[in-house]
Image (tube, rainbow, N blue to C red):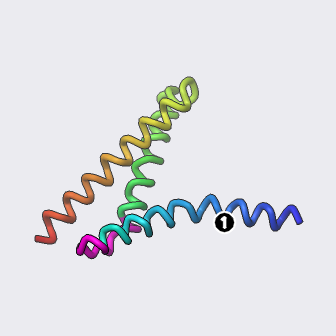
């Protein structure tokens, strides 16, 4: 029974980001914009967030202040995602 609980918990954890991306795709589709790069943008944001956390950890900053390191990594991921969005928008015109 514990295995079923672990599988259910992991499913919920991994499904939430995908549901948020699907919700963003629904809103962009309703506004008349077809965005087929949603998963790629999500992956790029996750990549840059992980790279930022790794760099903060090697500098010793992530160990001392983990929450601040996490917030900085989230902001770096958001900036990377916005950069990709702008690049896709400019190159598609």
**Residue 86, quarter of the rendered image:** bottom left
Q: Which residue is mark 1?
A: 11
Residue at 19% x, 60% y: name it: 87
Quarter of the picture containing the N terminus is bottom right
* Prevalent SS, magenta region: loop
36 in magenta: yes
State the image coordinates of residue 46 (x, y, percent, origin top left): 44, 54
Quarter of the picture containing the C terminus is bottom left
Residue at 43% x, 40% y: name it: 73
State the image coordinates of residue 9 (x, y, percent, origin top left): 71, 60
Specify whether 41 is left or right of 62: left
Residue at 38% x, 58% y: name it: 44
Specify whether 65 is left or right of 92: right
**Start and end of the magenta stretch?**
30-40
State the image coordinates of residue 15 (x, y, percent, origin top left): 58, 65
Farthest residue, direction left = 93
């Amino acid at each position: 029974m514990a295995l079923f609980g672990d599988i259910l918990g992991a499913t919920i954890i991994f499904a939430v980001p995908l549901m948020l991306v699907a919700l963003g795709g629904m809103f962009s589709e309703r506004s008349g914009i077809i965005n087929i790069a949603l998963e790629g943008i999500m992956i790029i944001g996750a990549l840059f967030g992980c790279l930022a956390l790794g760099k903060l950890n090697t500098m010793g900053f992530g160990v001392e202040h983990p929450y601040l390191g996490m917030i900085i990594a989230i902001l770096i991921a958001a900036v990377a995602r916005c950069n990709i969005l702008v690049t896709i928008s400019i190159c598609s015109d």
